[in-house]
Image (tube, rainbow, N blue to C red):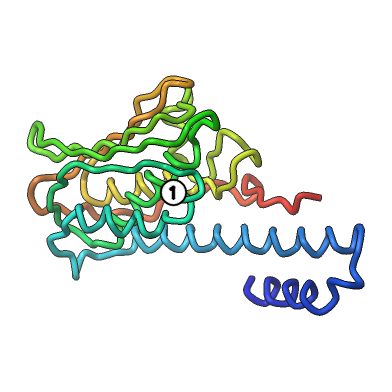
Amino acid sequence: MRLITSYSQLLLRRFSGSLEGDALRCVDCIEQGARRMQQLLTDLLTYAQISADDGADHDCVDLNLVFQKALQNCKSAIEDTKAHVTSEELPTVYGRETHFVELFQNLIGNAVKYSGKEYAPRVHVSAASTDGVWRIAVADNGIGIAPEHHRKIFGAFKRLHGKEIAGTGMGLAICQRVIERYGGQIWVESQVNQGATFYCTLPLTKSVTPLSAAPLPAAETISIGLGL
Protein backbone atom coordinates (compact mmCIF):
# COMPACT_ATOMS: atom_id res chain seq x y z
CA MET A 1 0.00 0.00 0.00
CA ARG A 2 2.85 2.39 0.80
CA LEU A 3 4.45 1.60 -2.56
CA ILE A 4 1.23 2.22 -4.50
CA THR A 5 0.58 5.45 -2.62
CA SER A 6 4.15 6.69 -3.08
CA TYR A 7 4.21 6.08 -6.85
CA SER A 8 0.78 7.60 -7.42
CA GLN A 9 1.89 10.71 -5.53
CA LEU A 10 5.10 10.76 -7.57
CA LEU A 11 3.07 10.63 -10.78
CA LEU A 12 0.96 13.56 -9.66
CA ARG A 13 3.99 15.63 -8.65
CA ARG A 14 6.13 15.00 -11.72
CA PHE A 15 3.52 14.77 -14.44
CA SER A 16 0.59 16.83 -13.17
CA GLY A 17 1.14 19.29 -16.02
CA SER A 18 0.86 16.61 -18.69
CA LEU A 19 -1.86 14.50 -17.09
CA GLU A 20 -5.42 15.54 -17.84
CA GLY A 21 -8.93 14.18 -18.19
CA ASP A 22 -9.30 10.45 -17.60
CA ALA A 23 -5.58 9.93 -16.91
CA LEU A 24 -5.62 12.45 -14.04
CA ARG A 25 -8.83 11.01 -12.61
CA CYS A 26 -7.44 7.46 -12.75
CA VAL A 27 -4.27 8.40 -10.85
CA ASP A 28 -6.35 10.27 -8.28
CA CYS A 29 -8.63 7.24 -7.84
CA ILE A 30 -5.61 4.97 -7.35
CA GLU A 31 -4.27 7.25 -4.63
CA GLN A 32 -7.61 7.52 -2.84
CA GLY A 33 -8.21 3.76 -3.05
CA ALA A 34 -4.74 3.04 -1.65
CA ARG A 35 -5.33 5.40 1.26
CA ARG A 36 -8.64 3.71 2.09
CA MET A 37 -7.08 0.26 1.90
CA GLN A 38 -4.20 1.36 4.14
CA GLN A 39 -6.67 2.65 6.73
CA LEU A 40 -8.61 -0.62 6.55
CA LEU A 41 -5.43 -2.64 7.12
CA THR A 42 -4.55 -0.41 10.08
CA ASP A 43 -8.00 -0.97 11.61
CA LEU A 44 -7.81 -4.73 11.03
CA LEU A 45 -4.40 -4.84 12.72
CA THR A 46 -5.79 -2.92 15.71
CA TYR A 47 -8.72 -5.35 15.93
CA ALA A 48 -6.40 -8.36 15.82
CA GLN A 49 -3.98 -6.94 18.39
CA ILE A 50 -6.79 -6.39 20.90
CA SER A 51 -7.74 -10.06 20.52
CA ALA A 52 -4.14 -11.24 20.90
CA ASP A 53 -3.34 -9.10 23.97
CA ASP A 54 -2.48 -11.36 26.94
CA GLY A 55 -2.87 -8.64 29.58
CA ALA A 56 0.74 -8.92 30.77
CA ASP A 57 1.39 -5.16 30.89
CA HIS A 58 -2.06 -3.93 31.96
CA ASP A 59 -2.19 -1.25 34.64
CA CYS A 60 -4.44 1.44 36.10
CA VAL A 61 -5.57 3.84 33.37
CA ASP A 62 -6.92 7.34 34.00
CA LEU A 63 -9.75 7.83 31.50
CA ASN A 64 -9.43 11.61 31.84
CA LEU A 65 -5.98 11.38 30.23
CA VAL A 66 -7.36 8.93 27.68
CA PHE A 67 -10.07 11.46 26.79
CA GLN A 68 -7.46 14.18 26.19
CA LYS A 69 -5.39 11.90 23.94
CA ALA A 70 -8.48 10.92 21.96
CA LEU A 71 -9.29 14.63 21.48
CA GLN A 72 -5.82 15.21 20.06
CA ASN A 73 -6.24 12.30 17.66
CA CYS A 74 -9.60 13.74 16.52
CA LYS A 75 -8.35 17.33 16.48
CA SER A 76 -8.59 17.84 12.72
CA ALA A 77 -12.20 16.60 12.48
CA ILE A 78 -13.22 18.57 15.56
CA GLU A 79 -11.76 21.80 14.18
CA ASP A 80 -13.20 21.25 10.69
CA THR A 81 -16.73 20.78 12.03
CA LYS A 82 -16.38 23.28 14.92
CA ALA A 83 -17.48 20.48 17.24
CA HIS A 84 -17.90 21.09 20.97
CA VAL A 85 -16.62 18.05 22.88
CA THR A 86 -16.86 18.00 26.68
CA SER A 87 -16.34 15.52 29.47
CA GLU A 88 -17.26 15.09 33.11
CA GLU A 89 -14.84 13.60 35.62
CA LEU A 90 -13.98 10.09 34.43
CA PRO A 91 -12.81 7.10 36.50
CA THR A 92 -9.59 5.14 36.58
CA VAL A 93 -9.94 1.62 35.18
CA TYR A 94 -7.67 -1.36 34.69
CA GLY A 95 -6.27 -2.37 31.31
CA ARG A 96 -4.08 -1.04 28.51
CA GLU A 97 -4.20 2.68 27.77
CA THR A 98 -3.99 2.26 23.98
CA HIS A 99 -7.17 0.14 24.02
CA PHE A 100 -9.15 2.87 25.74
CA VAL A 101 -7.72 5.57 23.48
CA GLU A 102 -9.01 3.54 20.53
CA LEU A 103 -12.39 3.25 22.24
CA PHE A 104 -12.79 6.98 22.94
CA GLN A 105 -11.26 8.02 19.62
CA ASN A 106 -13.73 5.93 17.63
CA LEU A 107 -16.78 6.93 19.67
CA ILE A 108 -15.95 10.65 19.60
CA GLY A 109 -14.86 10.48 15.95
CA ASN A 110 -18.13 8.81 14.96
CA ALA A 111 -20.16 11.35 16.90
CA VAL A 112 -18.46 14.17 15.00
CA LYS A 113 -18.62 12.40 11.66
CA TYR A 114 -22.32 11.56 11.83
CA SER A 115 -23.45 15.02 12.91
CA GLY A 116 -26.15 16.99 11.15
CA LYS A 117 -25.02 19.63 8.67
CA GLU A 118 -27.40 22.25 10.06
CA TYR A 119 -25.55 22.73 13.36
CA ALA A 120 -22.18 22.15 15.00
CA PRO A 121 -21.67 18.73 16.61
CA ARG A 122 -21.94 18.52 20.39
CA VAL A 123 -20.46 15.51 22.15
CA HIS A 124 -20.48 14.86 25.89
CA VAL A 125 -18.72 12.06 27.78
CA SER A 126 -19.83 11.06 31.26
CA ALA A 127 -19.46 8.19 33.71
CA ALA A 128 -21.38 6.75 36.65
CA SER A 129 -20.91 3.84 39.03
CA THR A 130 -23.90 1.51 38.95
CA ASP A 131 -24.50 -2.17 39.78
CA GLY A 132 -20.82 -2.84 40.40
CA VAL A 133 -19.57 -1.42 37.10
CA TRP A 134 -18.58 1.89 35.58
CA ARG A 135 -21.03 2.97 32.90
CA ILE A 136 -19.46 5.30 30.35
CA ALA A 137 -21.75 7.33 28.09
CA VAL A 138 -20.85 9.23 24.91
CA ALA A 139 -23.82 11.35 23.83
CA ASP A 140 -24.16 13.42 20.65
CA ASN A 141 -26.67 15.57 18.77
CA GLY A 142 -26.12 13.89 15.41
CA ILE A 143 -28.28 12.26 12.78
CA GLY A 144 -29.17 9.31 15.00
CA ILE A 145 -29.61 5.61 14.23
CA ALA A 146 -32.83 3.76 13.54
CA PRO A 147 -33.58 1.11 16.22
CA GLU A 148 -33.43 -1.77 13.71
CA HIS A 149 -29.74 -0.97 13.13
CA HIS A 150 -28.67 -0.70 16.78
CA ARG A 151 -27.07 -4.16 16.87
CA LYS A 152 -25.94 -4.31 13.26
CA ILE A 153 -23.57 -1.32 13.51
CA PHE A 154 -21.19 -3.17 15.83
CA GLY A 155 -20.37 -5.78 13.19
CA ALA A 156 -17.09 -5.62 11.27
CA PHE A 157 -17.43 -3.76 7.93
CA LYS A 158 -21.05 -2.82 8.73
CA ARG A 159 -21.82 0.69 7.49
CA LEU A 160 -25.22 2.35 7.12
CA HIS A 161 -24.34 5.19 4.74
CA GLY A 162 -22.12 3.56 2.12
CA LYS A 163 -19.81 6.00 0.36
CA GLU A 164 -21.74 9.05 1.57
CA ILE A 165 -19.64 9.16 4.75
CA ALA A 166 -16.01 7.99 4.70
CA GLY A 167 -14.93 5.06 6.87
CA THR A 168 -13.85 1.42 6.95
CA GLY A 169 -16.73 0.02 8.99
CA MET A 170 -14.33 -1.18 11.70
CA GLY A 171 -14.60 1.60 14.30
CA LEU A 172 -17.51 0.25 16.35
CA ALA A 173 -16.30 -3.34 15.93
CA ILE A 174 -13.02 -2.22 17.56
CA CYS A 175 -15.00 -0.51 20.36
CA GLN A 176 -16.98 -3.68 21.00
CA ARG A 177 -13.79 -5.76 21.02
CA VAL A 178 -12.16 -3.46 23.57
CA ILE A 179 -15.16 -3.55 25.90
CA GLU A 180 -15.54 -7.33 25.60
CA ARG A 181 -11.82 -7.62 26.34
CA TYR A 182 -12.50 -6.21 29.80
CA GLY A 183 -15.68 -8.12 30.48
CA GLY A 184 -18.07 -5.27 29.72
CA GLN A 185 -20.92 -4.54 27.33
CA ILE A 186 -21.54 -1.83 24.74
CA TRP A 187 -24.83 -0.67 23.22
CA VAL A 188 -26.49 2.39 21.71
CA GLU A 189 -29.73 4.22 22.41
CA SER A 190 -30.87 6.39 19.53
CA GLN A 191 -33.63 7.51 17.19
CA VAL A 192 -33.26 9.00 13.72
CA ASN A 193 -32.59 12.76 13.86
CA GLN A 194 -32.49 12.68 17.67
CA GLY A 195 -28.80 12.06 18.32
CA ALA A 196 -27.27 8.94 19.82
CA THR A 197 -25.80 7.85 23.15
CA PHE A 198 -23.31 5.01 23.22
CA TYR A 199 -23.02 3.23 26.55
CA CYS A 200 -20.31 0.85 27.67
CA THR A 201 -19.59 -0.83 30.98
CA LEU A 202 -16.25 -1.55 32.60
CA PRO A 203 -15.64 -3.43 35.85
CA LEU A 204 -14.83 -1.54 39.04
CA THR A 205 -12.13 -4.10 39.81
CA LYS A 206 -9.39 -5.72 37.76
CA SER A 207 -10.89 -7.93 35.08
CA VAL A 208 -9.42 -9.15 31.82
CA THR A 209 -11.44 -11.49 29.65
CA PRO A 210 -9.46 -13.70 27.23
CA LEU A 211 -10.81 -13.41 23.71
CA SER A 212 -10.73 -15.94 20.95
CA ALA A 213 -10.06 -14.59 17.48
CA ALA A 214 -13.37 -13.30 16.17
CA PRO A 215 -14.29 -14.44 12.66
CA LEU A 216 -14.49 -11.67 10.10
CA PRO A 217 -16.94 -11.49 7.19
CA ALA A 218 -15.97 -13.09 3.91
CA ALA A 219 -13.62 -11.06 1.73
CA GLU A 220 -16.27 -10.31 -0.85
CA THR A 221 -18.17 -8.15 1.67
CA ILE A 222 -15.25 -5.70 1.91
CA SER A 223 -15.71 -2.86 -0.55
CA ILE A 224 -13.01 -0.20 -0.85
CA GLY A 225 -14.04 1.32 -4.13
CA LEU A 226 -11.93 3.44 -6.48
CA GLY A 227 -14.70 5.82 -7.39
CA LEU A 228 -14.60 4.82 -11.06
Q: Quadrant of residue 137?
A: top left
Q: Secondary structure at mark 1?
A: helix
Is residue 107 depicted above or below 33 in this figure?
Answer: above
Q: For mark 1, what is the residue?
A: 78
How would you rate the neighbour count of disc 1 (Cα within 10 Å): few for under 14, some for 14-19, many for 20 or more? many
Q: Residue drawn at (50%, 63%), measured in percent from left and top? A: 42
Image position, residue 142 (x, y; %):
45, 30
**Is 134 situated left or right of 38 in this image?**
left
Q: Residue drawn at (51%, 30%), measured in percent from left and top? A: 116
Q: Quadrant of residue 47?
A: bottom left
Q: Between residues 32 and 147, which one lies in front from this camera angle?
A: 32
Image position, residue 49 (x, y; %):
37, 63
**Is 61 situated left or right of 171 in this image?**
left
Image position, residue 121 (x, y; %):
43, 36
In this rendering, does residue 147 appear at all?
no
In this rendering, does residue 52 appear at all?
yes
Q: Residue drawn at (33%, 34%), measured in percent from left and top? A: 198
Q: Between residues 100 and 127, which one lies in front from this camera angle?
A: 127
The N terminus lies in quadrant: bottom right
Q: Residue drawn at (64%, 38%), measured in percent from left and top? A: 164
Q: Between residues 71 and 54, which one lies in front from this camera angle?
A: 71
Image position, residue 95 (x, y; %):
19, 59
Report the number of discs.
1
Is residue 154 depicted above or below 71 in this figure?
Answer: above
**Is 18 situated left or right of 89 in this image?**
right
Q: Between residues 199 and 70, which one lies in front from this camera angle?
A: 70
Q: Amino acid at mark 1?
A: Ile
